[in-house]
Image (cartoon, rainbow, N blue to C red):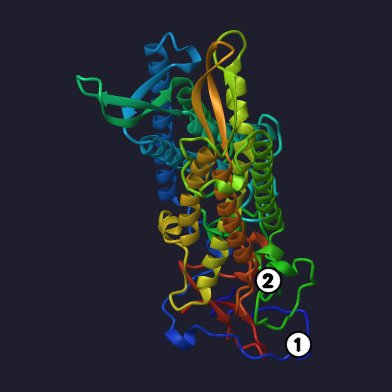
Amino acid sequence: MAATSSKPTDHYWDPTSLLSCDALPNPRDEFGSLISDTTSITETGTEFYNRSLTSRRYALVGMVCSGVASCCCIIAGIFIMATDKEGGVMAEITVISSSKLQKEIITLGLNFIVTLCTESTGFVHGISLRSALASESRLRFNSNLRLLTAARGWRNPNGTLSNGIMAVLLIISYSSASLVTLSESGVEIIGSPDNEVDQIFTVYSTSILGLPFLLLGVALFLQVVIASSGIGAVKILTWSSSPFDVTAALIHHTQLIPVPFRCMRAVSDLDVHGGPAKPSDTQPSAWHAHPSIRKVIMSLWGLVLACAGWATLVMYFYDKYKSNSITSISWSFFPSDQFSNAVIYGMPLSGNGPWWILYLANVAVFQGPLALGLHCSELIVDVLRDERYWRCASGAKGLKLATNPLKSVFANPLCLVLLVVKPVLHWMFGLALTTNPGVYLQTRGIAFYMYTTQIWNLCIVLLIFACCCTLISLRRPHGPQPAAYGHLQTLANLVDEWSPVMWWGHKEDGNPYCHAGRVLV
């Protein structure tokens, strides 16, 4: 972008050789007179990028809350296991109710808590990773795949080893939340003194297991520890998630140098030689601009195919070993009590052998890809958020650098949708693969129920989610404003002067040709 500055601009080509084009929009036509005169960040130095200390306070509060939640889970798990000493791994507290809805409410609530905790620690971990990549001159985009992008060094809290541990802990968090509750039903008969049956009704018992609660707390706590060590191992240039604050900070610390004569070059033109260019009516999509977006979309469609394959296998084994026809099962949202549409297998949880490891791994193998796929989908939302923010520069209100960090989340529909979709999909996975108490090898154990209908329900929701992510990734922004999608070098090339509020349009600076840039109005 460029400003209405009276300073002469050096050029290295003949202006008469430029292609003619219509003038770009000039925000001054809408706003009139100049209201501020701001110097370049390269001249003033320090204060034109927001270090976002407010974001730091919010982030630290989120970390503290995550730490408190993890400690509560650890204490609750230890308390349950200490209270039910005979239960061992199956130590539990049982609550009697007249409906299975109680179990589902507890599970859904736990998934929401896990999402909030992992998002809080993930934000801090992402900030430290971005600063670590910037210190290594490897930061290309403002938004990156947090667990799949690593800084150099095995001991680095943002390195490959730590990121791998964070990925495992994320999977354990959601898997443990799915295993915390067990549900069992029984029939209770109320009779009269003359042995006549007056009433028969079903009683449900919801058991809260101590071991999964303990593992959930440990997993959340270790994520807090790793994220905290990350911010202590690197200098944080800015806590802001805005690509403009990051770009300005890198320019100020000479870690990023703007390239002249690329004021109309979008992120898709990185390999094109600089110089004049005609404004385009449409800009490239996120699919074409960000290489990692394509990988995320393909991984989401891989999740859909894997879920469909899972449902098909369950249908095959059910049809092979059961006499009932699968087509006779009602397509309800919640599993039925008759288990007529489920493939069942079990394992003991006491006696010799660490059965609890197999118990957790059994769920993590199925739920792990879902957790990682939803984590990767964050990149789509973040990249589109960065581009939406940049395109505010050609709007009536302009682009404001100083914004409330919470507003960028709660005012963005895509962020809110993803914040809800994550726990709901994990909860739906818990409906598709449920656990119930049983007796195996003459000892207490767990029965796993794979419900065909609920697996298909999960597959359908994943299909809708993948379609929506694909469509918004393929959408091409309209207008001559070059698309950046949070690419820091592109933004550095497009912005030549910085101010608290900026507009983008045709820069009328006396040149005999169209010059796109940022205009102070």
In this view, the mark in front (1 or 2): 2
From the viewer's perspective, is residue 196 above or below residue 313? above
Residue 130 in sight from this viewpoint? no
Check disc 1 and give the amino acid type: Leu
Q: Nearer the viewer, residue 183 or 240?
A: 183
Q: Which residue is mark 2?
A: 284
Q: Secondary structure at mark 2?
A: loop
Q: Secondary structure at mark 1?
A: loop
Instruction: Inspect the image, locate mark 2, and give the three-letter code of the amino acid beneath it.
Output: Pro
Q: Say which residue label 1 marks.
A: 18
Q: Whole-percent x and y of residue 212?
A: 49, 25
- Residue 277: image quadrant is bottom right
Give the image quarter of residue 182. top left
Disc count in the image?
Answer: 2
Q: Earlier in the sequence, mark 1 or mark 2?
A: 1
Res 430 visible: yes
Q: Residues within 10 Å of mark 2 (few under 14, many from 20)?
A: many
Viewer-proximal residue, 107 or 165?
Answer: 107
Residue 266 locus on image (x, y percent) = 68, 71
In the rendered view, would you say 295 is above or below 310?
below
Query: Residue drawn 43% across and 35% down?
Result: 66
